[in-house]
Image: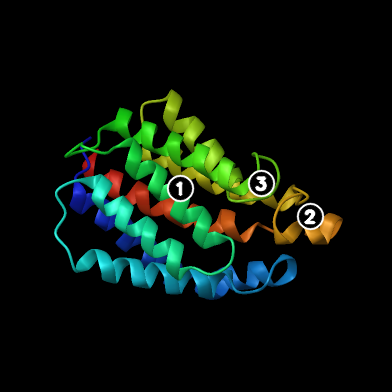
Amino acid sequence: MELNGQDIVAWFDYTNEKIQQHKEYLTSLDQPIGDGDHGINMARGYQETVKRLAAKEYSEPSEVLKDASMTLLSKVGGASGPLYGTAFLKMSMAVKGLETIDQDALVKGLEAALAGLKQRGKSEVGEKTLLDVWGPVVEYCSGNDLKVDVLLDTARTAMENTSGLQATKGRAAYFKEKSIGHIDPGSASSFYVFEALAEVLKEKL
């Protein structure tokens, strides 16, 4: 498996398609336990990201990740912009200088992204945030030969499991016990990120 700059562009393209398609669903998840704008914010941010990426030619994956991170940081509102922006910026730094990313480099990048998310959000897995998808996915990728269907199942199960958690971080924490029974919106958008990555990997593996 070798992912080049165009493969990383495709990752953001596929994610954007999924976010646009499920924009209303993401917003509906955010209404009971958030500000009700997660879908709108993510759709706007990813639309601007793919527009920016389409305007350039890239020789390195890290350059794509950096441009994407800066766009998401500035165009996605709320807490999600800084979080997703940080994740992809840390990933960019971890794979800097590589013309292609193999599985080891991908894992290194995802681990850096996860560390960045924890630091930026001052949170850990289990607090009903997007970390509850990123954590299990990175753990799976770190310890196994990548299988696309297992990656997808890991991300989907992790997202669904957030329904049973009580939020202790972010806007949803204000709702305390009432946050139980709802899928975390950031975990849902993260699922689409990894679903898109799985599609890119399927073309390569």
- Look at the image and tell me whether residue 3 can be seen: yes
Say which quadrant the N terminus sits in.
top left
The picture quadrant where one finds residue 38 is bottom right
Say whether disc 2 or disc 3 marks the residue closer to the N-terminus: 3
Query: Dot 3 surroundings within 10 Å: few (below 14), some, or many (20 or more)?
Result: some
What label does residue 41 carry, if any? none
Residue 102 position, x and y percent, is: 25, 33
Residue drawn at point x = 41 percent, y = 25 percent = 144
Q: Secondary structure at mark 2?
A: loop
169 vs 178, nearest the viewer: 169
Q: Is residue 21 among the parts visible in the rendering?
A: no
Three-letter residue code for mark 3: Asn
The answer to whether residue 143 is above or below residue 77 is above
Q: CA distance from mark 2 to mark 3?
A: 11 Å
Looking at the picture, how far across and down is residue 9, in whole percent? Answer: 25, 57
The residue pinned by badge 2 equals: 180
**Disc 1, disc 3: CB below 8 Å?**
no
In the picture as drawn, the residue positioned furthest to the right comes out as: 177
Within 10 Å of disc 1 (Cα), the crowding (few <14, some 14-19, many 20+) is many
Query: Looking at the image, is 180 positioned above or below residue 201?
Result: below
Which label sits on residue 87? Answer: 1
Residue indicated by mark 3: 161
Percent coordinates x, y for residue 99 in the rendering = 16, 39
User: Which sits earlier in the primary sequence, circle 1 or circle 3?
Assistant: 1
| 26 horizontally vs 168: left or right | left
Foreground mark, 1 or 2, reads 1
Q: Residue at x 65, y 57 (%)?
A: 184
Q: Residue at x 75, y 52 (%)?
A: 167
